[in-house]
Amino acid sequence: MNKESDSYSDINQEIVMTYKQHSMELIDGKKTAAIIKEEIAEQVIKIKSEGGKMPNLAVIIVGDDGASATYVAAKIKACEKVGFISTDIKLPDSITEYELLEEIDKLNNNDEVDGFIVQLPLPKHISEHKVIEAIDPKKDVDGFHPVNVGRMAIGLPSYVSATPAGIIELLQRYNIQTEGKNCVVLGRSNIVGTPVSILLSRKSETGNATVTLCHSRTKNIKEICKQADILIAAIGQEEFVTGDMVKKGAVVIDVGIHRVKSDKTKSGWKLIGDVNFDEVAPKCSFITPVPGGVGPMTIVSLLQNTLLAAQKKVY
Amino acid sequence: MNKESDSYSDINQEIVMTYKQHSMELIDGKKTAAIIKEEIAEQVIKIKSEGGKMPNLAVIIVGDDGASATYVAAKIKACEKVGFISTDIKLPDSITEYELLEEIDKLNNNDEVDGFIVQLPLPKHISEHKVIEAIDPKKDVDGFHPVNVGRMAIGLPSYVSATPAGIIELLQRYNIQTEGKNCVVLGRSNIVGTPVSILLSRKSETGNATVTLCHSRTKNIKEICKQADILIAAIGQEEFVTGDMVKKGAVVIDVGIHRVKSDKTKSGWKLIGDVNFDEVAPKCSFITPVPGGVGPMTIVSLLQNTLLAAQKKVY
């Protein structure tokens, strides 16, 4: 009897799982990023065939932080793959703020370079804000300059920073309607939460959502999340969003990425997000996994901005 | 019997009204504006006594729109009252965009002028965006330049535009806590709804609220409003907010101003807001009237920004 009921239970479980798999779609950031890279590569070939100038990105990296070096290498590699010209400019940790600002000025005035970024974080003796504000907004393909943030806020053409742009692109590519939807954004950072909350509320095809921006001081966060048709988790806390915080049929975008110990992987660690995937996924209509969701889209956004810069489509 | 019950009902009514009057406080924008103007005037006297330079505001007005002329005259008068130097620069309707940009360039390079504004709207043949972006952000005391909007969004010092700044100032002066409060903003305009929604969600003394930005595409607007601890109505529709949309004890800020016919006034018209005051006021802990609420604060914000510009406290 026990065995039989176990087997019934297994069948039941399987049916439930099948149902869940059918009703929930994984948003594949890796695949989407690959498709967009191909599209960009095709455009570059077209530009070349018409005798145009190849898009040219420069990346400044200060010091020898390992993680920064990895990110920059990935950006340079992605540029090469789509046919862009790219240069990494390595500057020593000991560089003064003034010297760095001079380097930025050179790139501002270098007509060969369409866009450039300064890899963050910077050494403590250098003001990140001063550096960001020194970049010519027309070449600010990271979209961090106040001019680009401000233009985005008032609905003018601008370079949008990588993560918010990647999120919007994923929603578009998966035909997820935002108009009139209740959208909850967790986290108010300058590079993710705040800009994505602004973008989604703009009067635009990929906006028109009713957006609530939540953060560390929000009191009734569970309640608010439960009302979300689209939930964007960028709060920087491991598996903060649990199953009981999500409405059935919601779209969940997980921006978090945390490296945690695991006894189930060979390496001894694994990557998790701001969302408890196992609990939340079965309730969703769409969800991004971690890794392979929003992450791969960020480099693509940088490539898109560089292409826009080369084509002078923003300014 | 009927008379008696009528008289009971009257007494009852009176008790209810007394209770309501005690629990609801009117936010007096006119009085607050007058107090702040006095504070500014005192600061100007202090600057003068220390041999400093008087704050200097220039106002460009293009064409002869009656309403614009009235606004500009009020601004110039307010400047004079607090001891600022002010100039209005009247330009003809026929001015070209290029000529206007040249005028702006002159003011950008005029060391005497601390801040200046270009009164909107402009004639149709002139791009407002181009004009706004031509103003040196350091002198943009209207706070419309993307640099100022962007800096506000990322929490850097900036000139905040008049109405959002006035709203924040009123909340502060009436000791209305925003931290952790559910705040609903109705309307996503570039000069009111969007910036005030950003300001209230920033990590700051006058921010830290959980903000929901609603607009024409919002579906469940009544429900959302009912959850607001602080409701800011800037949707541009006469008496849009009705009694059933407001939670008991809410703070209601009415940004709307509409001139409507009235058979109760001598002039034959009266001013009303985006809020149905008679229905909503009895439910509120605080409410701004129309007129005399947010309106009088806007000129004060312009004076405050000009003082900041003269003192070089933003840039």
Image (cartoon, coloured by chain):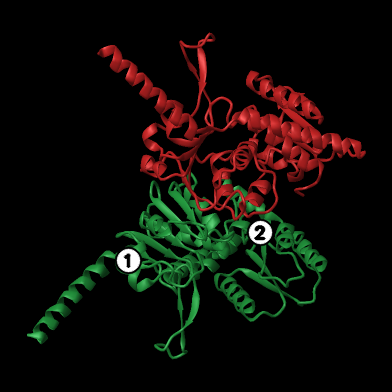
Chain colours: A red, B green
In primary-sequence order, the first of circles 2 and 1 is 1
Camera sees residue B190: yes
Position of residue B12 relative to residue A280, above or below, is below
Instruction: Quickly name the residue at label 2.
Output: B140
**Can you see residue A56?**
no
Q: Residue B198's x, y, as percent?
A: 52, 51
Q: Residue at x 42, y 70 (%)?
A: B31
Where in the figure is residue B244, as x and y percent of width and height?
33, 64
Image: A31 above or below A140:
above
Cβ–Cβ under 8 Å for marks 2 and 1: no
Query: Would you name the residue on which mark 1 appears?
Result: B25
In the picture shown, does residue A153 fall above or below A102? Answer: below
Say which quadrant the N terminus of chain A sits in: top left
| Chain of residue at mark 1 | B
Residue A16: which quarter of the image? top left
Q: Position of residue B194 (x, y in %)?
A: 55, 55
Disc 2 sits on a residue from what chain? B
Q: Nearer the viewer, residue B103 or A148?
A: A148
